[in-house]
């Protein structure tokens, strides 16, 4: 049976971006730095997007960004075609490549799963009510997006307020009963 740990939004740690151009709310982290320059083993965070600008470059880190809110958002990753993002669209990219966000003035928000590519792997799913997911990774974090959510992990009922999270250790079967969940898995 999975070990479940609630992570309420009120407990998320707010901190500046590595490049100092914005702030993020850290949802969960394994802070052990890596030998290759990665400042952590993995990290899940939520950031407000206030306009265009460069992303922090993070050596040895891979990441998946999922757009939660925002219009006209385009991500420019060095060496790739520009990637327009809509609500719940995900993009995976190396965190050590120059990356630039393009968007018109207005609010936006994203979730970022980042991991040390030498020591971990990551996966992200966005699930709606009525959808289930077999969590195979040893660790997952589910975040209620767009409002409150109700789910079950191995049959144990879970209720999350908007943007609250749940850490799931040991794998298990996740079923979404109401709302939407962002689920990050780290192996």
Image: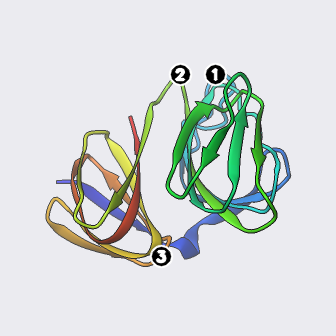
Pair 3/1: label in front: 3
Using the image, tell me which numbered label, if any, was put on residue 35. 1
Residue occupying image coordinates x 44% and y 31%: 121
Real-space Cα distance between discs 3 and 2? 33 Å
- Give the x, y percent position of residue 132: 22, 55
Residue occupying image coordinates x 85% and y 51%: 20
Q: Is residue 114 visible?
A: no
Using the image, tell me which numbered label, if any, was put on residue 118. 2
Disc with the residue nearer the chain's start (3 vs 2): 2
Real-space Cα distance between discs 3 and 1? 36 Å
Relative placement, left or right, of 136 versus 13 is left
In front: 181, or 3?
A: 181
Per the image, the residue denoted by label 3 is 162
Relative placement, left or right, of 175 versus 80 is left
Disc with the residue nearer the chain's start (3 vs 1): 1
Pair 2/1: label in front: 2
**Circles 3 and 2 in contact, beta carbons < 8 Å:** no
Q: Is residue 167 visible?
A: yes
- Give the x, y percent position of residue 23: 75, 59
The C terminus: image quadrant: top left
Relative placement, left or right, of 185 versus 101 is left
Disc with the residue nearer the chain's start (2 vs 1): 1
Mark 3, other Cα within 10 Å: few <14 / some 14–19 / many ≥20 = some
In front: 14, or 184?
A: 184
How many circles with numbers are drawn on the protein?
Answer: 3
Mark 2, other Cα within 10 Å: few <14 / some 14–19 / many ≥20 = some
Quadrant for residue 60, please give it: top right
Residue occupying image coordinates x 67% and y 32%: 95
**Circles 2 and 1 in contact, beta carbons < 8 Å:** yes
In front: 12, or 57?
A: 57
């Amino acid at each position: 049976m999975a070990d479940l740990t609630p992570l309420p939004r009120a407990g998320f740690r707010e901190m500046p971006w590595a490049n100092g151009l914005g702030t993020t709310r850290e949802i969960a982290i394994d802070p052990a730095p890596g030998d290759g320059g990665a400042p952590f083993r993995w990290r899940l965070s939520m950031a407000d997007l206030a306009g265009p600008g460069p992303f922090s470059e993070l050596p040895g880190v891979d990441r998946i960004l999922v757009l939660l809110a925002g219009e006209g958002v385009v991500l420019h990753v060095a060496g790739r075609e520009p990637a327009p993002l809509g609500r719940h669209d995900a993009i995976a990219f190396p965190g050590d490549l120059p990356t630039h966000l393009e968007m018109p003035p207005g609010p936006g928000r994203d979730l970022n799963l980042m991991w040390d590519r030498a020591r971990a792997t990551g996966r992200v799913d966005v699930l709606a009510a009525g959808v289930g997911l077999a969590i195979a990774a040893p660790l997952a974090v589910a975040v209620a997006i767009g409002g409150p959510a109700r789910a079950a992990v191995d049959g144990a009922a879970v209720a999350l307020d908007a943007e609250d999270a749940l850490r799931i250790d040991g794998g298990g079967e996740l079923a979404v009963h109401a709302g939407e969940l962002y689920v990050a898995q780290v192996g």
